[in-house]
């Protein structure tokens, strides 16, 4: 199975400053390692010393919470991946709009998977805070979100 590769050059806007490109690149590198490569050991190695406030209530706080959730999720869906469609940078915030799919054969099919908007706060090159909004695109993902979405694993709130 080929791992999707996010090409930051095709997502970079011509008007971005060097600082904006650096912030977007930091987020895209993280997303590639986590969501496409599923390289959880490298994520822990590179990012676990950072403060990371999580606003997705189904994940525990910190990088370890993200890794635990995604490691468990990819056991159920090992072909899970993110196809990043857009990246926006506003001050310290990087917004990534993606199509997430569970199976390789569903990549590119916008009737399957999830429409996800992630927002990260990036300070001094470090991802320090994360919010997301998820829209299930098919019945199986709607059912999954219905059953999996109830437990609150951090007290940070969604905003």
Image: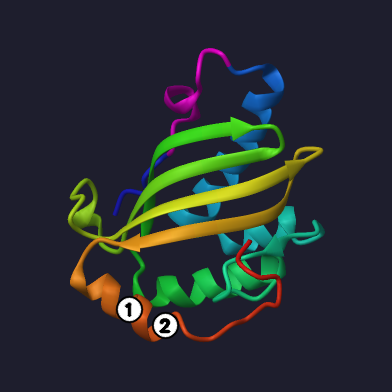
Q: Which mark is residue 144?
A: 1
* Residue furthest to the front: 159
Residue 58 x/y as whole percent = 54, 76
Please state if 139 lies on the left or on the right of 129 as rendered.
left
Alpha-carbon distance for marks 2 and 1?
6 Å
Judging from the image, what secondary structure is the residue with disc 2 in?
helix
**Foreground residue among 22 and 155:** 155
Please state if 107 lies on the left or on the right of 40 as rendered.
left
Residue 60 x/y as whole percent = 65, 76
Judging from the image, what secondary structure is the residue with disc 1 in?
helix
Residue 148 x/y as whole percent = 42, 82
Q: Are marks 2 and 1 in contact (CB under 8 Å)?
A: yes
Label 2 Cα crowd, 10 Å radius (few <14 / some 14-19 / many 20+): few
Which quarter of the figure has residue 104? bottom left
Query: From the image, which quarter does the N terminus lie in?
Result: bottom left
Residue 14 x/y as whole percent = 51, 13
Q: How many marks are shown on the rendered structure? A: 2
Q: Which mark is residue 148?
A: 2
Query: From the image, which quarter does the C terminus lie in?
Result: bottom right
The region drawn magenta spans 6-15
């Amino acid at each position: 199975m080929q791992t999707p590769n996010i090409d930051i050059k095709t997502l970079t806007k011509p008007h971005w400053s060097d600082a904006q490109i650096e912030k977007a690149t930091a987020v895209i590198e993280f997303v590639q390692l986590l969501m496409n490569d599923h390289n959880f050991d490298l994520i822990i190695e590179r990012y676990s010393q950072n403060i990371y406030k999580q606003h997705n209530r189904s994940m525990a706080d910190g990088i370890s919470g993200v890794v635990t959730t995604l490691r468990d999720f990819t056991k159920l869906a090992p072909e899970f991946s993110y196809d990043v469609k857009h990246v926006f940078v506003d001050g310290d915030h990087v917004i990534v709009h993606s199509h997430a799919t569970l199976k390789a054969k569903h990549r590119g099919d916008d009737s399957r998977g999830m429409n996800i908007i992630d927002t990260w706060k990036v300070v001094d090159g470090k991802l320090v805070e994360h919010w997301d909004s998820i829209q299930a695109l098919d019945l199986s993902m709607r059912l999954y979100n219905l059953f999996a979405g109830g437990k609150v694993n951090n007290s940070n709130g969604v905003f």
